[in-house]
Image (cartoon, rainbow, N blue to C red):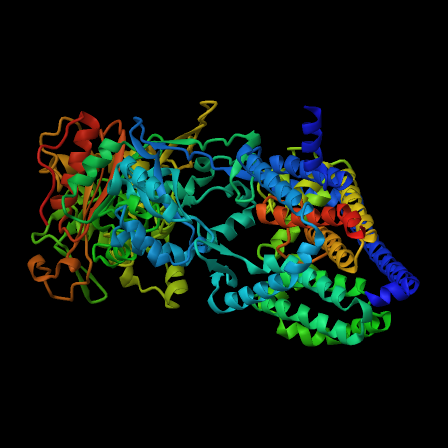
Amino acid sequence: MSELSINPGIEIRDSERELDRFRRRLATLGFFVLTLFGLLFLRFFYLQVIQHSHYSTLAEANRISVLPIAPHRGIIVDRNGVMLAHNYSAYTLEITPSKLQSLEETIDGLSGIIEITPRDRRRFRKLLEESKSFESLPIRTRLSDEEIARFAVHRYRFPGVEAKARLFRQYPQGEMFSHVVGHIGRINKREVEQLEDDGRLANYRGSDYIGKTGLEQSYEKFLHGTTGVEEVEVDSGGRAVRTLSRTPPVSGNNLVLNLDAKLQEVAYNAFGDRRGALVAIDPATGGILAFVSKPGFDPNLFVDGIDPQSWSELNGSPDKPLLNRASAGTYPPGSTFKPFMALAALFYGKRTPQQVISDPGYFMFGGHRFRDSRPVPLGMVDMYRSIVMSSDVYYYMLASELGIDPLAQFMALFGFGSRTGIDISGEAAGILPSTDWKWRRYKQKWYAGETISVGIGQGYNSYTPLQLASATATVANNGVMFRPHIVNHVEDIRTREKTLIESQPLRELAIKPEHFKVVRDAMAGVNKEGTGARVFANAPYTSAGKTGTAQVIAIKQGEKYVESRVAEEHRDHSLFIVYAPADKPTIALAVIAENAGFGARAAAPVARQVLDYYLLGKLPAVTGGKR
Amino acid sequence: MPFMLRRLYRFITGHIDGILLCGILLLMFTGLLVLLSASNGSYVRVSGQLMNMLVALGVMWLFANIPPHYLMRLALPLFITGCALLVGVALFGDVVNGARRWLHVGVTRIQPSELMKIALPLMLAWYFNRNEASLKLRNYLIAALLLVIPVALIARQPDLGTALLITAGGCYVIFLAGLSWRVISTLFVAGLASLPFLWPALHDYQRQRILTLLDPSGDPLGTGYHTIQSTIAVGSGGLLGKGWMNGTQTHLDFIPERTTDFIFAVYAEEFGLLGNVVLLLLLLFVIGRAMVITANAPTLFARLLAGAITLTFFTYAFVNIGMVSGILPVVGVPLPLISYGGTSLVSICLGFGILMSINTHKKLVQT
């Protein structure tokens, strides 16, 4: 205080100087403030003026999301409108693995409120391996309303788990139609590549499923429909806030089949617990009326990915339920080959109908004795009796005279040894033996002795039941041949427009009508007084058939085939071809019952039940045969 | 009773600076407007913020009526308490989001670093004022030490954003106290040289934030997301903005923390460059008025404190806007007077209350 009183002037000047210095410092900071705000202004100018359109675009891209809308898949019905494949709406519980902390914990937690079977878990795990982790994968399908309500209550506990309403494919007829209708399944990597190559991938944005087998696969383009597009405004979580524009999807087309579901059922059940196949064709159109491969499997198992256990059960079963016997299984035709051999003989002029040969019960060729399968020799045999009584010797002799290559050329006319072109994939071509074939296959020359057993449908001969049925239908139709087809027409669901499938004949065989008449009469004789007579006794319609028995294993020279001594899977296959009514056929079919022995015993009764139902509407009283 | 009313009026407004209050109220009003949009028209949020504002204005009034020399007495005890609490946090603090920032005190818990924001400038201003007569380099070194202690404790939590802001506040005081330019430039060069050694000392997430600033697209869904989305919001606003309540980035939830730290993105998207310039001018108006008060403050203590408060306010605004528009790394700094949240509002208004007190009590000091 004393200093102040002594020299107040210095103090004031000093503090003035201090204040001055302070204000200069403050001004410096004011300049600093202005500079930095100027910097902010420049930044705003850059973002909001110079780069404005760029950021506008980004904001729009943030805001707008283009969502695909999957179309409804077309349904599949039989000729009478019976539903074979349809869609229904139900809830699934779906998990997006990438959004989860622990998948196991989540599933365990979920199983506390909703039933999740070990099979669901296995199926999910398999699905997981095949998918990307950000995809939404179903852990449970077909949730009940009660389950949905329970999940809704506990939802907050399960981020990354969602209940979604989805359309499901269902096959109400189950295993009976498994090989015809086929099934859909989740699109896999290979299919994505295929779709990309075809330029169809864009249409599958939003689709999770694609036809895998059967009609579902071969008519995929018709069934799938066109994906719609929805432009929606989304928030940062990807949730749609409102719709900006919408192009509705176009539902897939429906398939109406030639198949008769009831006929199929009768045929399927007629096999009892035997394995086998049956193909029935309308000879006038080539339309498939029944297409049975038994045993089948439940196609519904495959829709959302089959669990490994069910898969290995199906895949490992000795009954081979996954094999489509009707078009991918090949069998020696046995004696059902004989009517076609007879036609070949007439065609090449090697035999007249009346020409008689002597059947001593065997045929000698090159020191080798070819036995007839029947114990009592037939004696004098003409063409009619050769078919009706099924003489082997007649056809041993004939085949030997025709030679393998002319025989093969003739049989090729009926489609033996080549794919029929039926409208489902996975068809086998079978084997029509010829010198050329043997050279290509084995690099060996053909031995004349090998021709002999080809004459009775044995040897290298191997055809699908479909080929046999198609050839039978061609005989029934006097040589006018159609490509067999399961689908009758494709129906546009909006315009009701129908597109017929394969309505034109494939070709007409240059075989004289009188030659057909000889063979057709003989086949009618089979069911009247021959090997099929007992089975077709008292039938109120006429029919023309041929029994067949196909050896599964070769019988050694001088040995006798005794059924009871042979393991079941080595027993003979039972075959039967037939068309009816004999004069104006409306149905032609081929049946094979695996390891069931003589044709007239197992296969023909199946055919009888099918014909009784188809022609008379008569349902079999007691179904099934014994093994 | 006009006399009574006039007395009441004088009692209320006697220590309020009308110009500063005007700027503050304009900013608060802008804040409410943006908040209404940012919260999708949630009146609950807006009325909550209105309550915060009333409380903050009350605090401001209270501090405007406390003469500065009372604050001077508080400086040392407040600073020591603050440091003690920070040590307490380091020892017993709650860990939230990987950082130890909160301390339980009885029924509630506090964040002592908030207290330090005001306690440190107060302390430094008090210290310089005490040694006003003979400021030597030694005094600046001691001031630097006073600065480093709390900053180090806060940086350890870790809360680098707050540590840097408090450092800035302290540095303003030291700068205004007249640290010679020679020392400043030496320190600046030394600071630049030591940058490569500081880098390894940073936490992973801190380094990540700085890298993200340099290239936000490097991690678009992670740490870069905030910056990318807020930059898009600002840029898509354009010259005039998309209009109030019409920002798509805002209303479709693309801007994270859009009512608090990132509220400026909402503002810039809806009001555009024009709105931004208006906001900058409003801020400049408040800062300018605060600087005038600072320049006219009667004592060194008052000048330094006022300068620190003014420039801290500026720094908050600059760092926040810079972060939202993508030129500064993401640090948890609210936009003063605009962002939703009571703590920030109250502490900012407390500062303005002190400014007003300094401005209106100088005659009393002089007499």
Q: Is residue A170 left or right of residue B363?
A: left
Which of these two is toward me, B56 or B363? B363
Q: Where is residue B279 in the image (x, y as percent from the top left)?
A: 75, 41
Where is residue B55, by image quadrant?
top right
Residue A580 in sight here: yes
Q: In this view, does A195 lie to the left or right of B271?
A: left
The residue that appears at 42% across and 44% down in the rendered structure is A209
Where is residue B152, by image quadrant?
bottom right
> Number of labelled discs?
0
Q: Where is residue A465 in the image (x, y as percent from the top left)?
A: 28, 46
The residue that appears at 85% across and 67% down in the rendered structure is A3
The quarter of the image holding the N terminus of chain A is bottom right
The residue that appears at 47% across and 37% down in the rendered structure is A70
Q: Is residue A549 left or right of residue A500?
A: left
Q: Position of residue A571 (x, y in %)?
A: 15, 57
Residue A414 in sight here: no
Q: In this view, does A287 lie above or below A402?
A: above
Which of these two is toward me, B89 or A100? B89
The residue that appears at 29% across and 47% down in the rendered structure is A301
Q: Position of residue A241 (x, y in %)?
A: 54, 35
Which of these two is toward me, A256 or A312? A312
